[in-house]
Image: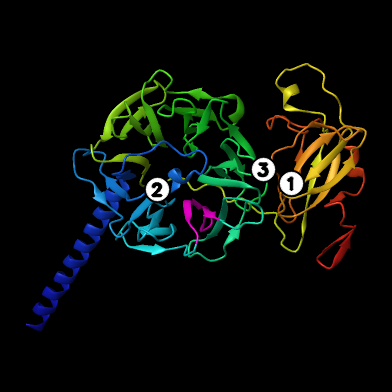
Amino acid sequence: MNKIRATIVFFVVMAIGSACIFFSSCSEKSMNEMIVFTRSSGKTKYLDYDTTDSWRYIPQAQIVALDPNNPAGSVKVLTTNYYSARSPQISFDGKYLLFAGQQKQNDPWQIWEMNLRDLKTRQIIASKENCTDPAYLPGGRLVFSKFAPNDTLKAGHSLYTCNLDGSNLKRITFNPHTYFASSILSDGRVLTVGRQIFPEKGDPMFIILRPDGTKADMFYKGTKDTFITSPGLETNNGRIVFIESDKVFRGKGNLISISYNRPLHSRVNLTSEIGGDFHAVCPLHSGRLMVSYRKSESDRYALYEFDPDNKALGKVLYNNAEYDVLEAVETGKHDRPKKLPSELDMGVKTGLLLCQDINVSDMQSSGNTASFPKSSRIEIVGIDSTLGSIDVEEDGSFYLKVLADKPFQIQTVDKDGHILRGPSDWIWLRPNERRGCVGCHQDPEMVPVNRVPLSVKKSPVVIPGHINKVIEKKVSLE
């Protein structure tokens, strides 16, 4: 009798275990086949290009999940315990969801992660300041934007990285820009939208940098009549897709595609022949795209498939007269980007910058054969004052040792001190970083001439100029 009872208990336990595994597997499978997107019941305003607040801080937004095979079915709200939430990002293994959220109306925006198996959330960042626009990095880290209201570098939202438990927080941008809408390219670099806010406001542009903040440079800048208004996301065929909005016709956003290999010279407007307004885009595993689109200002932004080859809208994935779709992602596993090595050495207080020839410019690279006055001197300008002025070598080269994590600009001057070109974009060097450029304001796609600059045959010039020596690792370096 005891044997029979034991056998029955055994099979009951096995049945319960199998059922748990089955339902857990079904739950995970169903989330792997879902589309997760942000929706807002409020009427979406035109994007605020001056403050960018309307890009980040959307009141009462929800992150929801939808079965694309049953678009007519009801959606599942994933963030019911939050006053507002947005910026969903799926982990590389497809098991977790990263997002920015406000638990209560007056709380600062913080970074959270959700386990997609049980939909439980945990807080990663707990700050007094608003933190938004998170993205997963390889190696168990993430990058996000954090507001710095009293920043000495006059920045707005700077980029930070941290571990997935919120530890080891590190700032990685050090210029007077505001940053948002970051994504990670397959090569491991961070592609983010940056906009200068000091000394005057500039247009948004894509900035590319490594996760440690080194090698920061312009990746793409829109036309004089457009603004970048969404993250740049990489497709599986080597393109970057994003939305650009018209400066004059605020209700006209277009879907733009550029080449990863030649971002400055490969712009294609995929929706120039389609009326209406595109708000967001996301590449799908199938090679197609998902877009947030509305035909007119009186309509809501709905979620559509889009065929980039034929430049045509496809089927409607979600349309609700009470909500605007702001952004969307596809769940499931996806390729992990490369984990880049870092050259940072926090025991070093400087970085090195080499320029091959200050008289090479982007105007020459674009085929302009006009002659420009040649410079023999550069001036290095900081946030509050001039950091130094030096003569360049006969070949136009210079070699600088600059205090790390301090923003500066470079302008070329003649012998009488008149500015010829500049100032450059804001530059910063991380501790122990080594950077080089072809010339001043050169086309970033230019490659250097195969020669050794005269300036590297001497010791680098220390900047700021009033510093005679820098103590690094207990070694005096002139």
Q: Does the image show residue 205?
A: yes
Q: Does the image show residue 262?
A: no
Q: Quadrant of residue 392?
A: top right
Question: Which quadrant of the rendered structure holds the C terminus?
Answer: bottom right
Range of magenta residues: 129-147
The earlier-in-sequence mark between 3 and 2 is 3
Q: Secondary structure at mark 2?
A: loop
Residue at label 3?
199
The amino acid type found where label 3 is placed reads Pro
Instruction: Check contact, mark 1 vs mark 3: CB within 8 A.
Output: no
Residue at label 2?
333
Residue at image location 88% in from the left, 36% down from the top? 377
Q: Secondary structure at mark 3?
A: loop
What is the CA distance from the residue labelled 2 to the residue labelled 1? 41 Å
Where residue 138 appears, x then y in whole percent?
Answer: 52, 53
Where residue 391 appears, x then y in whole percent?
Answer: 91, 39
Where residue 435 appears, x then y in whole percent?
Answer: 75, 44
Frontmost of labels 1 and 3 is: 3
The earlier-in-sequence mark between 1 and 3 is 3
Residue at image location 33% in from the left, 25% down from the top? 313
Where residue 172 appears, x then y in whole percent?
Answer: 62, 53
Question: Which quadrant of the rendered structure holds the N terminus?
Answer: bottom left
In front: 316, or 154?
154
Instruction: From the image, give the main secondary structure of the stretch colored magenta.
Output: strand
Frontmost of labels 2 and 1 is: 1
In front: 277, or 435?
277
Instruction: Check contact, mark 3 vs mark 2: CB within 8 A.
Output: no
Q: Is residue 108 above or below residue 296?
A: below
What is the CA distance from the residue labelled 3 to the residue labelled 2? 43 Å
